[in-house]
Image (spheres, rainbow, N blue to C red):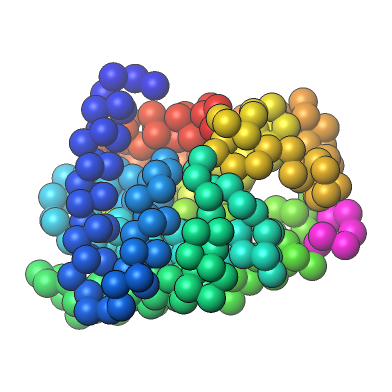
């Protein structure tokens, strides 16, 4: 990681966290519900999705403070999805980001409701943004509803569950991840462009970039499930192999998966090269997420 990227991430993550915690703290809700919501938000994480919102916004020299609200909203959605993924009825995980999962600490019912609360709060904070035109707020809410719902993340989770009983083809696996992981990454990237009034051509290139960097991100996740330890990942390593789950290494071999990762990464960078703005931070962030070790 370059010094420039480290400084960017350190500075922005502090501001993202401040916005996240403030938005939850100010709602009027049962104390133990807010504690459960904040427990998972404060468990750590790379904050990749909100960082993408801010990297794209800053790429267009957009200094609106509302970018941090959008960044917080997408992290709320991501965190809610992790709480629900870890539930006994889903992946039944007891470790997330190196800490006991939400349902282990607060019980299955409250964990489910904490996820529900984060999901719905994300749309509320977008609706209540000041200094943003109604048209842009409506577009952001619509984009997030598509990315997070049946047409995106939730639909991808259903496809993932359906695929547990059989070996998926590469095309089927890519479809799972374009929805389950890629849709929310696409929103993070495209929302920064929407906030910045990017041109249609700029948005088109960024959406294509999001498509490829999202797949690269997931392939690296699959590789790390094999090569990293549970301590490094902050969650149970080797689960995909143990359950005979369809992954990029399972379909392509470990070497083939690494080649496919590099292929998507190179295409993603080529999309950024078409933009007539300074994309250096976005390129550095891209390299970081595909070369990470946890």
Question: Viewer-proximal residue, 138 or 51?
Answer: 51
Seen from this angle, which residue lies furthest left? 131
126 left or right of 104?
left
In the displayed structure, 128 sits above or below 168; it is: below
Where residue 283 sits, quadrant-wise, is top left
Measuring from the top left, give residue 38's x and y in whole percent.
34, 59
Question: Viewer-proximal residue, 109 or 178?
Answer: 109
Mark count: 0
Measuring from the top left, give residue 195's x and y in whole percent.
24, 61
Where residue 277 sits, quadrant-wise, is top left
Residue 164 shown in magenta: yes
Q: Do we see residue 159 in this rendering?
A: yes
Q: Do we see residue 60 in this rendering?
A: no
In the displayed structure, 125 sits above or below 222; it is: below
211 left or right of 186?
right
14 left or right of 34?
left
Question: Image point 26% across, 50% down: which residue?
Answer: 17
Question: Viewer-proximal residue, 59 or 151?
Answer: 151
Q: Quadrant location of the N terminus?
A: top left
Question: Viewer-proximal residue, 12 or 137?
Answer: 12
**Range covered by the magenta-colored residues:** 163-168
Seen from this angle, which residue lies furthest right? 166
230 left or right of 8?
right
In the displayed structure, 125 sits above or below 179; it is: below
Residue 7 shown in magenta: no
Question: Image point 76% across, 45% down: which residue?
Answer: 240
Measuring from the top left, give residue 262's x and y in whole percent.
62, 30
Question: Image point 29% across, 35% down: which residue?
Answer: 9
Question: Image point 75% across, 54% down: which residue?
Answer: 173
Measuring from the top left, give residue 209's x and y in whole percent.
48, 46
Q: Quadrant location of the C terminus?
A: top right
């Amino acid at each position: 990681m370059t010094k420039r990227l480290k400084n960017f991430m350190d500075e922005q993550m502090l501001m993202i966290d401040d916005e996240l915690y403030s938005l939850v703290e100010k709602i009027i809700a049962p104390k133990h519900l807010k504690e459960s919501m904040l427990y998972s938000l404060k468990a750590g994480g790379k904050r990749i999705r909100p960082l993408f919102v801010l990297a794209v916004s800053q790429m267009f020299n957009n200094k609106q403070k509302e970018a941090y609200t959008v960044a917080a909203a997408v992290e709320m959605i991501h965190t809610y999805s992790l709480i629900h993924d870890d539930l006994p009825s889903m992946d039944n995980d007891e470790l997330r980001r190196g800490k006991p999962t939400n349902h282990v600490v607060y019980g299955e019912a409250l964990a489910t409701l904490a996820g529900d609360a984060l999901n719905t709060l994300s749309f509320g904070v977008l609706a209540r943004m000041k200094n943003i035109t109604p048209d842009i707020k409506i577009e952001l809410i619509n984009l997030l509803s598509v990315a997070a719902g049946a047409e995106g993340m939730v639909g991808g989770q259903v496809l993932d569950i359906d695929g547990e009983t059989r070996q998926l083809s590469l095309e089927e696996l890519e479809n799972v991840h374009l929805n389950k992981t890629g849709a929310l990454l696409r929103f993070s990237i495209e929302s920064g462009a929407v906030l910045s009034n990017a041109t249609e051509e700029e948005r088109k290139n960024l959406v294509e970039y999001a498509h490829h960097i999202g797949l690269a991100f997931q392939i690296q996740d699959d590789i790390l499930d094999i090569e990293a330890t549970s301590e490094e990942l902050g969650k149970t390593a080797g689960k995909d192999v143990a359950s005979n789950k369809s992954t990029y290494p399972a379909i392509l071999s470990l070497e083939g998966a690494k080649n496919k990762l590099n292929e998507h990464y190179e295409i993603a960078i080529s999309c950024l090269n078409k933009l007539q703005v300074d994309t250096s931070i976005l390129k550095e962030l891209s390299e970081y997420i595909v070369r990470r070790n946890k």
